[in-house]
Image: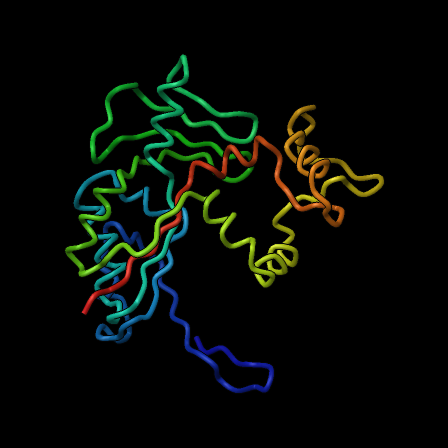
Amino acid sequence: MKTRSRGNEYIFNAEFITADCSKELLIDRYRDPEMCFDICSCQFVCHYSFETYEQADMMLRNACERLSPGGYYIGTTPNSFELIRRLEASETESFGNEIYTVTFQKKGDYPLFGCKYDFHLEGVVDVPEFLVYFPLLNEMAKKYKMKLVYKKSFLEFYEEKIKNSENKMLLKRMQALEPYPTHENSRLASEKVDDYEHVAKYMKNTQVKLPLGTLSKSEWEATSIYVVFAFEKQP
């Protein structure tokens, strides 16, 4: 597929492939098996491949093998340490709130591969996933000459990037954050009384332009289970 600009000039070619990247070698499906890439983005999906070593390795091979030196493999995945911390703090095999729930099969049993849990995100996801022990992902990536150059929790990532005015504008254009206080005749996403007390407290102690973009406590709790990462391809 060729994509045109507004001036009717070709700006890039796109090739679409439907495949399970944890079970199938993608270069066998490329028009040009020798092509290389500068970046591979893997958002909220690599944990599905950690059912077995073979699947996780195939996912990494597809993501990294054809990267050019200096290219990046970037992604977002649940933080295994945070998931286990919340699980162990729970009185059952499940934890969460009205936005999300995570249910493990058994406490105290966390194999490196095939550690299955059910993840439910309201209106978006309701599927089984597998725990990704990040030090293991880091070691496995070295097989494909990848070096970890960036890893932060979603909260750390947000607090770092929100300082940039261009990033703020992008969030606004995407309508990624909820305005607080709301406009007339509109409702907050959460009806829980204390779900926005952190915003009210911040507004009280800081001079800010209103409305303020935010998420409810329940939404922040859901997003904070993730980590963002970047690996760089070595020569």
Q: Quadrant of residue 109?
A: top left
The x, y position of residue 202, in whole percent, is: 66, 37
Q: Is residue 180 left or right of residue 117?
A: right
Camera-nearest residue between 46 and 83: 83
Q: Is residue 199 left or right of residue 126?
A: right
Q: Is residue 192 above or below residue 92?
A: below
**Quadrant location of the C terminus?**
bottom left
Q: Residue at x 69, y 23 (%)?
A: 193
Camera-nearest residue between 150 and 48: 150
The x, y position of residue 104, in whole percent, is: 35, 24
- Furthest residue to the right? 184
Q: Is residue 151 above or below residue 120?
A: below
Q: Is residue 190 above or below residue 227?
A: above
Camera-nearest residue between 152 and 53: 152
Q: Residue at x 25, y 59 (%)?
A: 62
Q: Is residue 180 left or right of residue 90?
A: right
Q: Residue at x 55, y 81 (%)?
A: 5
- Furthest residue to the top? 91
Q: Is residue 167 above or below residue 126?
A: below
**Quadrant location of the N terminus?**
bottom left
The x, y position of residue 128, in whole percent, is: 36, 33
